[in-house]
Amino acid sequence: IQTSNNLLSFSNLYNQRILSIKNQNLINKPTFIYEQQKRWHIHHHHGPHHGHDGDNHGLIVVLSDPKSRGTKVTLLGLACNVALTAAKGAAGCPPDATHPYGYGKYETIGSLAVSSLLIIGAVGIGHHSYEILINLLPSEIPNSINELGEAINSRTDDNHHLNPNAAWFAVASVIIKEALYRITLKIGLEERSNVLVANAWHHRSDAASSVVALGAIMGSYLGFPFLDPLGGILVAGMIMKSGFEIMLDSLKELVDVRVEQEVINQVEKAVEKLKGTDPNIVNFHNIRGRKSGPFYLIDMILQVNPDLTISKAHNIEEQVRQAVKKECKCVKEVLMHLDVEDQSPHH
């Protein structure tokens, strides 16, 4: 699980700004940072390296500072990684004396923790982008519009072109992360694992952040640096939305909200099939279920032939249990109450 990569794009976008602030001591004048960037990329007052070496140096400097926003964003991703890995590992442990129903709820707790981290991170990213945008728009929009033609003409006259590597890396990241999102989401839905679904959305958020990075690159090239904070606000909203959705699903699971009707239908299908071949199964009803991580715990009432011995009745119970588990792979346990009287309408 690679959640740290999901938010790394944001730290890359902020690193240049933070480094420029440190170098110029212009913390209270964020618009000047973009003025310097425009001198580098629009008016070309630089050497043959176009000032890009400073970008890489900035990343190292900022990430080495534990107080920088870039470092905090990266550490947030690492925290998500640790929580997801620990939760998924614990959920796979078999039942024991202390956890007779298994450790599936630990995955739920992990998903809840990760969703909280995502929401906190989204708020931080959105707030930071908003502050930059507010300080940037009054002076930068008129300047950007006026200098757009000059920027294009300057590049044409000087035969300068945008370094394609950064843009191509962003495009490749979008394609790869979107593919990972679709694959991981498919597996997560099949296994009904909130952790895998959360990881899938992390890939989607990473793909979106790469789109923002691409927009920031092109915006800087064309003299529109405000596209960066606008994209940051957009992606922060996407991350917050997925975080709240994952949190809601986790809370429903913790309070034992009934399982999806699809699962109940699969259980009914399995018992009906066995009932058609064994006349000793008279009826079944009151099927209930609750989710425990990636697994489901089902209980039901099974009515059998009153003339059966206790031993034969329990044999039928085990047959029903195995039939349900075979039909619905996500069911981990089936608890049945045997009855000899029909107390509900026949199926």
Image (tube, rainbow, N blue to C red):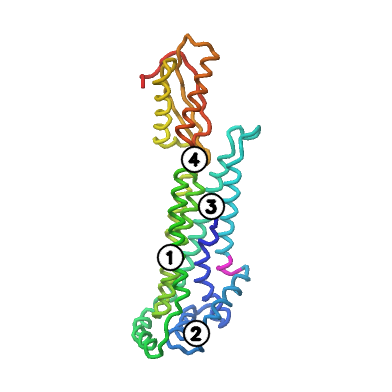
- Residues at marks 4 and 3, CA–CA distance in whole angstroms: 15 Å
- Residues at marks 3 and 1, CA–CA distance in whole angstroms: 20 Å
Badge 3 marks a residue whose secondary structure is helix
Task: Quickly name the residue at label 1.
Answer: 233
Classify mark 3: residues with Cα within 10 Å, few (<14), some (14-19) or many (20+).
Answer: many
Q: Relative to residue 101, is residue 75 depicted above or below? A: below
Tell which tag, 1 or 2, sits nearer the viewer: 2
Task: Quickly name the residue at label 2.
Answer: 50
Along the polypeptide, which appears first: circle 2 or circle 3? 2
Task: Quickly name the residue at label 4.
Answer: 253
Tell which tag, 2 or 3, sits nearer the viewer: 2
Task: Quickly name the residue at label 3.
Answer: 114
The x, y position of residue 83, in whole percent, is: 58, 51
Identify which amino acid the numbered label 2 is placed on: His
The x, y position of residue 202, in whole percent, is: 48, 56
- Residues at marks 1 and 4, CA–CA distance in whole angstroms: 30 Å
Along the polypeptide, which appears first: circle 4 or circle 3? 3
Along the polypeptide, which appears first: circle 3 or circle 1? 3
Name, please, the residue furthest toward the front: 277
Q: Which residues are magenta?
A: 67-71
Q: Quadrant of the C terminus?
A: top left
Identify which amino acid the numbered label 1 is placed on: Ile
